Structures are given as structure tokens and as C-alpha cells.
Image (cartoon, rainbow, N blue to C red):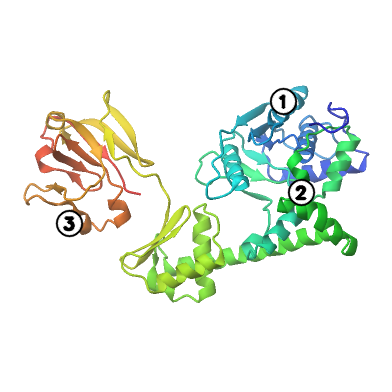
Amino acid sequence: MPSPGPSGPGDADPGTTASATLFKHLTQFLATRLRPGDRLGVAFSGGRDSLVLLDALHCLARGQTAAGELPRFVLSAVHVNHGLSANAADWARFCAAFCAERELPLEIVELGPIDAAGEGLEAAARRLRYAAFARCRTDWLALAHHRDDQAETLLMRLLRGSGVAGAAGIPVERALAAQAPGAPRLIRPLLDLPRALLTDYAAQHGLAWVEDESNADCRHRRNFLRQRILPQLATVFPGADAALARAAGHFAEARQLLDELALIDRERLAPAGGALPLAAFNALPAPRARNLLRHELQACGLPAPDTRWLEEARRQLACASPETCVELSGAALRVFRGFLHLLPARPEPPLRLAWPESLGTAATLDWGGEPLSIRAAVGAGISRARLLAGEVCFTRRQGGERLQPDPRRPRRSLKKLLQERGLPPWQREHLPLLWSGEQLAWVGGVGVDAAFACADGEPGFVLDFVPA
């Protein structure tokens, strides 16, 4: 529920210490990033930190400060309702009222039931929240993490035994979702400022906010550190939060050097890009091999695995069989013909997919997360008449299929044809097969059966499918 105090927007007073410091800091931070007309969103929970950030940016957007010039920008907010608290609906209403009073656009994202299987409720909620952020129609999305959050994060990760990457803490800026075109870039403008400054700003501006009741529960490890450990540290080590945040910065610098080393190793092993030659990878010293593996996973948007997994993967790859597979949540490492491939998880293709009833001139189907396109043609592809003579559908491989892509050669097993084309096993398992009744007419990545080839001037269909 809102904390005591008026909830209306306060008049910015550049003469007050907290306001002047915050406005100046935000102006310097944004001046190097914003271009005229940029859309800046704020992840707005209704709590003190995000409320102070949104209020201060609102003052800057309206030119109510003397902190310096900024390009004109369009400010908005997004509130993600996880539905995990009995007060969640009240928080959403509070955020709506706060933004309406300031005439700020607000998007409220309602998350459905959270499936926490295999990752825990907090991690699942975070994943869904960031997925919602990636869909925001803004150029930048600002989160309100501050210096105390950075100190807590560093302690949490060190106590878990994190390496340099984990100890680097919260990044001040990063791409929100490399796999989502048009996703905003995530920024944390308050990361160098202490929590106390935000509290002072809220008091000076008479701002109210909501309190998440779970923040008082010390059964949660972060709350335990925040409420019991860090205050005790500060009595013996004044400025502990600033020192920890500074250490996180040093770790971040070390992580950048490790990333650069991984890029050097990748360029040396695979100058043309693509898969890594396994023998050259296995010849790397163990720390550099682990560093390269970690970098490859993170480059695919996957969380960094722990050292034990990396070392076990390296051990298995050192004595790899021709088709070794090392599983990881969200990905797999596969060996094929002497090369190491990192494969992010993807949806399974359907067992059966019907031919589109109203095709028109073109259609695109979803085949296990990959596009399968069909277009009408003349004198090319599959004969329309012969294909539609039987029931038409797509299926996955079952085994034993035969195809005759070359009319000058006999019908052959699909397994042999795929082996000759050098398709890796994981691509073979993902290919669509097109049937007309009991006859196999086409196979993605292979081609049309000779019996279904379109003659000159004959109506037909051209299918396109490129195995990932």
C-alpha cells in the first residue's frame, strides 16, 4: 500500500541537494545516449526507486530543472503485474493514478499464471518480466537499480561462488533481447547513486509509493543481506556499499578482457566464423576453453553455466565420439564431423501439419519455429495436379522413407540422401516431409520427388525451407 505522504507530483527545486544531484546525474547520463525524439520508457513497479526515477525524468522531460540541456524525448512507463501478491491489483491502480496525474502514457502488462518448474518462482517471474520489457515500443527502457542493489547483487553472487562474470554485477547498459528485433536497449541510470539519495528526493517532493510486503521477509536471501548483513558491515566498514559497487566495476572490467580473449580465440580457431573445430578447441588450455565456451553460450543469449558444468563439458568433448551431445538447459553442444556446434533449444516440429486450405498465391507455415514457405508457380517445383490428387500433409521423419530426387537414378532411402548432403543429425530430425496420400512428394533441404516434378507450363508449387 502507499506509504504516508501526499501522492501528487512535487515541484522540482534545483536548490535542494537530492534534487540537484539527481537531476544533474540523469542529465549527464542521458545526454550521451538520447537523440531528439527518442522514446524513453521506465519500468515502473510503484515502489520508491522506480517512482523517484519516473518523477525525476518527468521533470527533465518538461524542462522543470536547471540541470542542463537534453534532447527532447518521449517519456512513458510500463508496469508488469505478476499477480503474486494480494495487493498486486492495488499496485497497478496506484501506478495508473500516478501516471494519469502527470499525463504519462502507461502500459500495464498482466502476466498469466507463472510456471516455475525447474527454475524457481523468482527466476521464472524475472524471465517473464524481461520478456515483457523486450516487447516495449520504446528505444530505451530505464530500470531503477541503484548502488545499494549493486552491492547486494555482488554479495549474493560471491556467496554462490560466482566467477568474474557473475561478480561483475548489474550492467549499467545492455541489449535487452538480441533475439527480438526492435527491442529497447536497457539502461540503469541510477546505478552509481545510493538508496539514501532517492529516499531524500522522495521526501523533498512529498512523494508516496507502494511497499511490497515481501521486502520485509528475511527468509529471502537478498532481504536478509539488505536488512541484517549490510547495515552491520557499514558499522565496521563505512561506505561498504560504495566499496562493493566499486569492486563490481573492477570485475566488470576483467570480464570485458575475458570476453575480448574469447573473441581472439574464436577468430584464431574459426576465422570464417561458424562451428569451432573440435581438435583446436581441445588444444586450448583449460581456463581458455572454459572461457570460450562460456562466451559462446552468452552470445546466444543463454545464462552462463557454472564451472562444474563447463569442466564436465570440456572433459566429454576431449574424448568425444563422432556424435557427442552435451545437454544444457536451453541448449546443447553437439559434435559432428570434427566440429563443435552450439544449438539453442527450439520447439519440436508437429507430428502432422495439414496443407493450407486457402493458399492463394503464397503462404508461410510455422515448422517448429522455422518458416516453411509455399508459393504458386508455373513450370517449377511440385506439380499441382499430382500433389492434390491425394490427401496432402506434412510430417516429420519416421524412418524408412524413400525419395527419387533425380529421375536418372533409382529411388533411394532418405537416410542415405541426407547423409550424402552432409546434414547434421539435428537438422535431419527437423526436416518437413510433404505427402500426397501414401507417396512422398518433397523433403525440405533435399527436393522434389521425380514423380511430382512440375512440367514446363504446368501450374505448381515451390516450397522453401532452410534448416537452421
Residue 7 shown left or right of residue 323 in the figure: right
How far apart are the two marked residues, 2 and 3, measured between alpha carbons?
59 Å
Q: Amino acid at mark 2?
A: His
Residue 247, placed above or below residue 453: below
The mark nearer the N terminus, 2 or 3, is 2
Q: Amino acid at mark 3?
A: Lys
Image quadrant of residue 114? Answer: top right
Residue in the picture at 55% in, 55% down: 303
Do labels 3 and 1 touch, CB within 8 Å? no
How far apart are the two marked residues, 2 and 1, measured between alpha carbons?
25 Å
Q: Can you give x and y, in whole percent of width and height, for residue 293 in the image?
A: 49, 64
Identify residue for label 1. Answer: 93
Q: Amino acid at mark 1?
A: Arg
Q: Is residue 292 visible?
A: no
Front residue of 353/291: it is 353
Residue 146 image label:
2
Front residue of 254/366: it is 366
Q: Can you give x and y, in whole percent of width and height, for residue 126 in the image?
A: 61, 44
Tell which residue pokes out farthest to the right in this image: 15
Residue 410 shown left or right of residue 399 in the figure: left
The mark nearer the N terminus, 2 or 1, is 1
Residue 243, placed above or below residue 414: below
How far apart are the two marked residues, 3 and 1, measured between alpha carbons?
63 Å
Residue in the picture at 71% in, 50% down: 220
Residue 416 image label:
3
**Crowd around label 3: few <14 · some 14–19 · many ≥20 (10 Å):** few
**Crowd around label 1: few <14 · some 14–19 · many ≥20 (10 Å):** few
Q: SS class of the residue under badge 1? A: helix
Q: SS class of the residue under badge 3? A: helix
The mark nearer the N terminus, 3 or 1, is 1
Q: SS class of the residue under badge 2? A: loop
Quadrant containing the N terminus is top right
